Amino acid sequence: MRDDEIGTIHIEDLEVGMSRSLTKVIGDAEVRSFAEVSEDRNPIHLDEDAGQASMFGGRIAHGMLVGSLFSALLGERIPGHGTIYMGQSLKFRAPVMLGAEVTATVTVREINREKRRVTFDCVAEAGGKTVIQGEALVLAPSRG
């Protein structure tokens, strides 16, 4: 399965170290759409003056918008369709400025085949910096 291929990797085929990545530009349209869906309309995300007045010197993307790229990877690419999210921890290391290209990567760290549980390391990078770091626990689909 290629990095950009959508589908399912069953628990029987997963191996420690397997990973998938997704790259996306986070722009004004994505931030405004996320604000509407999430109802998080913090001015630092939506208002240029508020962004300029902040410690970041400009508008920033919602951390959870960037973090949602992990959900896309886990639900669509690895393990993929049929995956059940059980938990996620995220540490926000740096802001994502509007217009930044973000690459999110999930990597299999641990597999419990008996319970069908898989732990992933999750990292998002933008501009050569780690912007989010964390882990996810999922229930992976099985052939059986």
Image (spheres, rainbow, N blue to C red):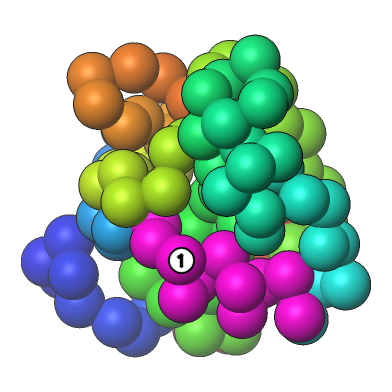
Q: Amino acid at mark 1?
A: Asp
Q: Which residue is tagged 1?
A: 28
Side of 92 where 120 appears, left or right: left
Q: Position of residue 56 (x, y in %)?
A: 56, 21
* Magenta region, residue range: 26-36
Write down the quadrant of residue 6 in the picture. Answer: bottom left
Q: Is residue 55 visible?
A: yes
Q: Position of residue 68 (x, y in %)?
A: 60, 59
Q: What residue lies at 73% left-to-right and 70% top-to-bottom?
A: 35
Q: Is residue 133 above or below residue 112?
A: above
Q: What residue lies at 57% left-to-right and 48% top-to-bottom?
A: 48
Q: What residue lies at 82% left-to-right and 62% top-to-bottom?
A: 41
The quadrant in which the N terminus is found is bottom left
Q: Is residue 39 above or below residue 46?
A: below
* Of 10 and 50, the residue lying toward us: 50
Q: Position of residue 131 (x, y in %)?
A: 48, 25
* Of 55 and 21, the residue lying toward us: 55
Side of 98 where 92 appears, left or right: right
Q: Is residue 18 above or below residue 23?
A: above
* Of 112 and 75, the residue lying toward us: 75
The quadrant in which the C terminus is found is bottom right
Q: Is residue 46 above or below residue 124?
A: below
Write down the quadrant of residue 7 in the picture. Answer: bottom left
